[in-house]
Image: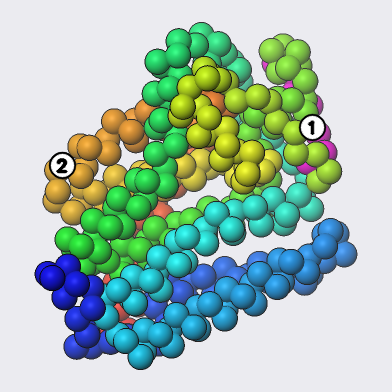
């Protein structure tokens, strides 16, 4: 009964307009819509992208209308939860948009070589191939969305007053990374190594593949213990939704860095220390499964901290203006 009362008690001060997260979605939608319209001659079949955006606008307005009729925590959560669930839908868009630009992997693989003198993504899984270690790597990589759900639910049930700010930060971070991925077309080792040739990579040669990924999306097999449960989870996710896009900076590392900051700020040490091992392993796992270069991980740490600081400050300013 207490849970039902918590979820369905009518809010004393219901929000009248769109939530901050919904404005973020509308802003990203408008930005990408303009890009689609300007680049439609270079794109193949943009109509589903346009139709999808129309449906998202309609869904957002419908959820707003339901909330206005029943302004409670449950309908409030549905408005935000729906936008979070749509993040995997937005992700492939980055490939459809950024493939109109020349690929830049040769630049980033070259930086990796200069910085480290080698390509860790090439030999990491080969050197550490034990099934238990492989499963730990894939477990941590697969924990990405569960960690987002965990922080979201914690703030909803335990820190409700901070729930809107938390989700604004998480959702905005995703869309910031998506914008970067559109205009900075880097595919990561699993795609680039295959396109460039493994012999070239092993010899420290990184050819410019130009617009190769405009028509190709083949990737290397995911390294690790192929019979493992978590390996299969990651492989299935890659088969259904992965595209040659989104390498620098690593959004997996960047978003989980933000989640760790939010977990620390919650003052719940069980939440923070429970997520910490997965966060640490994930930073290694992104290189282990050849999704990222090491410099992508470094970029994820730095960008995650900066994005959190900017969004946390920005939400405070927006809230003061609205009040």
Marks 1,2: beta carbons within 8 A:
no
Q: How is the image coloured?
A: rainbow
- Give 176 or 5, whichever is nearer the viewer: 5
For the point 65% across and 52% down, which residue is it?
92
Q: Which residue is mark 1?
A: 208
Q: Is residue 64 left or right of residue 177?
A: left
Which of pointers 1 and 2 indicates the residue nearer the eye? 2
72 over 253 or under it: above or below? below
Q: Is residue 283 visible?
A: no
Distance in Å between CA atoms under marks 1 and 2:
47 Å
Local packing at callout 2 (Cα closer than 10 Å; few below 14, some 14-19, many 20+) is: few
- Give 10 or 209, whichever is nearer the viewer: 10
Q: Residue 165: where, in percent of width, then height?
A: 30, 67
For the point 83% across and 43% down, which residue is it?
215
Q: Residue 301: where, in percent of width, then height?
A: 41, 40
Magenta segment:
204-213
For the point 55% across and 11% down, which residue is it?
126
Element class at badge 2? helix
For the point 30% across and 50% down, which residue is it?
150
Q: Which residue is mark 2?
A: 270
Occupied quadrant, residue 27: bottom right
Q: Specify which label sits upstream in the sequence, 1 or 2.
A: 1
Q: Is residue 154 left or right of residue 91?
A: left
Local packing at callout 1 (Cα closer than 10 Å; few below 14, some 14-19, many 20+) is: some
165 over 276 or under it: above or below? below
Q: Residue 142: where, in percent of width, then height?
A: 44, 37
């Amino acid at each position: 009964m207490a849970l039902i009362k918590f979820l369905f008690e009518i809010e004393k001060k219901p929000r009248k307009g769109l939530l901050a997260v919904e404005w973020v979605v509308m802003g990203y939608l408008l930005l990408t819509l303009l890009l689609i319209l300007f680049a439609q001659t270079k794109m193949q079949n943009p109509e589903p992208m346009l139709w999808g955006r129309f449906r998202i606008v309609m869904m957002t307005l419908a959820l707003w209308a339901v909330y206005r009729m029943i302004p409670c925590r449950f309908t409030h959560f549905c408005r935000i939860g729906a936008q979070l669930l749509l993040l995997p839908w937005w992700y492939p868009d980055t490939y459809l948009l950024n493939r109109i630009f020349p690929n830049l992997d040769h630049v980033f693989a070259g930086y990796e070589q200069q910085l480290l003198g080698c390509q860790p993504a090439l030999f990491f899984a080969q050197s550490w191939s034990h099934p238990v270690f492989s499963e730990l790597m894939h477990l941590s990589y697969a924990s990405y969305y569960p960690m987002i759900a965990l922080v979201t639910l914690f703030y909803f049930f335990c820190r409700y007053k901070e729930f809107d700010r938390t989700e604004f930060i998480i959702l905005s971070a995703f869309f910031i990374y998506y914008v970067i991925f559109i205009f900075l077309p880097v595919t990561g080792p699993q795609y680039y190594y295959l396109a460039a040739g493994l012999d070239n990579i092993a010899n420290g040669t990184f050819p410019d593949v130009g617009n190769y990924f405009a028509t190709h999306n083949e990737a290397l097999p995911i390294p690790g213990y192929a019979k493992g449960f978590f390996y299969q989870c990651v492989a299935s996710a890659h088969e259904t939704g992965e595209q040659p896009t989104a390498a620098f900076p690593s959004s997996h590392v960047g978003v989980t860095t933000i989640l760790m900051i939010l977990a620390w700020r919650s003052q719940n040490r069980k939440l923070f220390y429970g997520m910490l091992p997965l966060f640490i392993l994930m930073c290694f796992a992104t290189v282990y499964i050849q999704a990222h270069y090491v410099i992508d991980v470094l970029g994820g740490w730095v960008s995650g901290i900066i994005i959190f600081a900017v969004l946390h400050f920005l939400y405070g300013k927006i809230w003061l203006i609205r009040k």
